[in-house]
Image (cartoon, coloured by chain):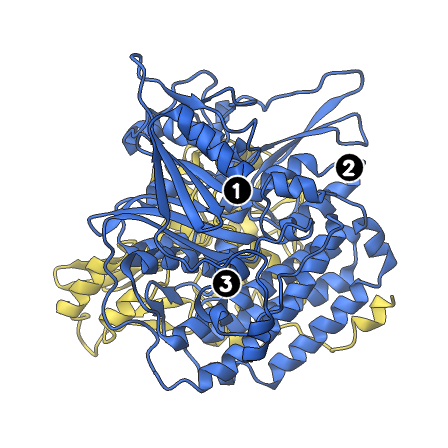
Chain colours: A yellow, B blue
Amino acid sequence: MAWAPHGLANGTVTTKWPRRPDAYFDDFPASVEVVVPEDAAPAADAAVLAAANACPTRAIAVEAGEVSLDRGRCILCGRCTRLAPETFRFEPGSATASLGREGLIVGAHEENDEALQRLRADLKARVRHLGRSVHIRHVDAGSDGSDEWELQALSSPVYDIHRLGIFFTASPRHADILMVTGIGTDGMAGPLRRTLDGMPEPIVVMAVGTDAVSGGLVGGGYTDGIGIAPRLASGGRGVDVWVPGSPASPFSVLHGILLALGRVDESGLRTRRGGRA
Amino acid sequence: MSEARTNATPTAPTAPLTTPSVTTLPDTASWHDGVVAAVTEGARFAGLYADRDRLIAVLDGDHGFELIETTIERDADGTASYPSLSNEVPPAFWYERAAYDLSGLIPTGHPRPDPLLLPLHPGSDRPAPGAPVTDLGALIVSADTDAPGPVDLRGHGLLTLMFGPVRSGVSESIEFLIETPGEDIPHLNIRPHFKHRGIAKRFEALAPQDAVLVAERVEGIASVAHALAFSHAVESAAGTRVPPRARLLRVVYAELERIANHLECAMRLSDAAGLSVAIARFAWHKELVMRTMSTLTGSRFGRGAVIPGGVRAPRVDPVVAFDADWSRLRNRILDDRRRVMRTSSFLDRLRGTGVLDADYARRWALVGPIGRASAHAVDARWQHPYDGYRSLPLPAEPALDTDGDARARLRVRWQEVDTSFDLIERAVVALDQIEDSRWSGDRPVTVPDGPALGVAEGPQGEVLYSVRFEGGVIARCLARSPALHDLVAFHDAFHTDVFTDFAFIEASFGLSYAGVAM
């Protein structure tokens, strides 16, 4: 069978993002937004309280009448958008990754700009030499299996991260980025640590998916899976990029990778460094 | 439409899903004999688990699903044991190990009572039957000190290759201990415990509308099938009638999920054979199928779409989602499938690889495409038809093959993809003709106390939920994925196959390890 010419049959199917906008990137409902009324904090009315109580992962906090939602806990079940549609709604757009855990909390929440600047500067110093050849080692620390599908999709012709100089690698020895999925089970604590030990400095760590960020819906039981951060903290490591989603969609993961490399910003727009992306 | 239905001769008696019949036997000896007798008489062994101090076997017999249970008395020293089924009923092999891990019930006479799901210290205490969750956590040993896995074969030149849990590429964590002289694989051990998440406990004390969200995450690549099986358990216990449009839309979601999973399998087999263009094309097709799912449900995996009592209203009219582009996608998949099934370098690697014969498949009660490729015709859509499958025309019998090798498993999947496209097409047409505009029941579903059982045919096979409700919430839940049931056959899939066949056999199984580790 002549496969090679057949591969040309349908032209280019690859997204142009981030060089050009992509409709699927922009339209996919990858997060829930807290609607803030003009000149006021989001109202904590009965509907909002009902939504906060009904949230299966307790992602919604109501403090002193102010509402916030932690996307790092949100599993996108949409229950709050049905109970309090005035306050919570699905937000189209895949630019959901954040350099700080705090950055995933939306609504009435003071973002600590200074802390974020520090994180950004620290990361920038580490990724400065990575250039256009970035290798990722993935470790599953107790996922439900869907996260791996979304990571594999990045190598498909639709996303084709090779065009951006990004590759998945078999060996931790070649890896620049450690990408971790899953709730961080007891059983994977050792293999995760040994993978980190096998990687050369500098290392960028990404927590991919709500499970990896916080343990999500399934975590928190007797296997101690409340996200991967506690697993890394014992080795003196922290998470550099947080990608929410249950699971995180391929575009959100790609946003996270390019955010880590300083090639796009939090809103998904190209930075000067990403000029040639 | 009705014509195809009347022609259909289901391969087993059709039993509508109702509350399972429960047989309680007085002691463990009569329980053991009762289960063995039922299986000998032709009942299909579908699972085994413990609920507090009760031991429950799930069987699928002539009159539908049956639970055979008994109460286990503890000895003076607190241990609880029962005569193992595994020697007479092979598929109980992993279930008995899992029940030992999770509930501390000792299967006496089990050929290999090693830990399966919990990474415990060798010789450490197991959780006592009905132990509270906090005690369980203290028993788990961190993998930092986890002892290496067992070595069974010894001889000149034999080595044990630890493959996993972190493997090359992007994959789920599992460890295969491959014992090999270098080329053949005479023996293999599977250790899935690394990603054990404590799923069974997670279900407990949850109301149905919360539990369905957990069900979607038992095996993330079959979220729809799990949500369906769980919802069926709730609906059969509560006597809920699902509105006609919801029943059809459920079929659409389930078949989309099946197409995506089967394309994933074709992709991984192409990857094993190094067919770059085929990998790229199947990956592209799969992405488009997942995008169709997200257009309809907002989730690429159809999460949140199926709820007990019905479905959520789709985000767009299904007629709009399945337009001319969808027909073109079907044709492209058909074309690429013809190509790959005529590529000799590909077929040479699949033919005769990873053979499981019909007798083996029957004895191990294998489900899904793995069973069906070895002539074991278990498919819940035929044997326990539910939702839209009751009204839509199905072929006379499920896709079957007799070769039992990797190629047969792929052939079965391709046939199923055809059926899936047909079912979606007909369901969408039928959806448009239904006047009842409801997507779910008017009232929230309330469940009575007692046992409930639900099944759905996922892409990997039968998904089964055996649940006991108490006070409107879950008291105990067996979320049995097809992966837990079928992966055990991986031990026996290497006959004359060599090391380089491993990737083909694994891909042809196409199982999710999250579903195994629970």
Report which quarter residue A54 is drawn in. Answer: bottom left
Report the Cα–Cα distance between label 1 and label 2.
24 Å
Q: Residue at x 43, y 52 (%)?
A: B217
The residue that disc 1 covers is: B484
In the rendering, at what x and y percent does residue B320 appear? 50, 85
Q: In the rendered structure, the residue with mark 3 lies on which chain?
A: A
The residue that disc 2 covers is: B499
User: What's the amino acid at mark 1?
Assistant: Leu
Identify which residue, B435 or A167, lies in the foreground: B435
Q: In the rendered structure, the residue with mark 2 lies on which chain?
A: B
Q: Quadrant of the N terminus of chain B?
A: bottom right
Identify which residue, A79 or B228, lies in the foreground: B228
Q: Secondary structure at mark 2?
A: helix
Mark 1 on the same chain as mark 2: yes
Q: Quadrant of the C terminus of chain B?
A: top left
Mark identifier at residue A47: none
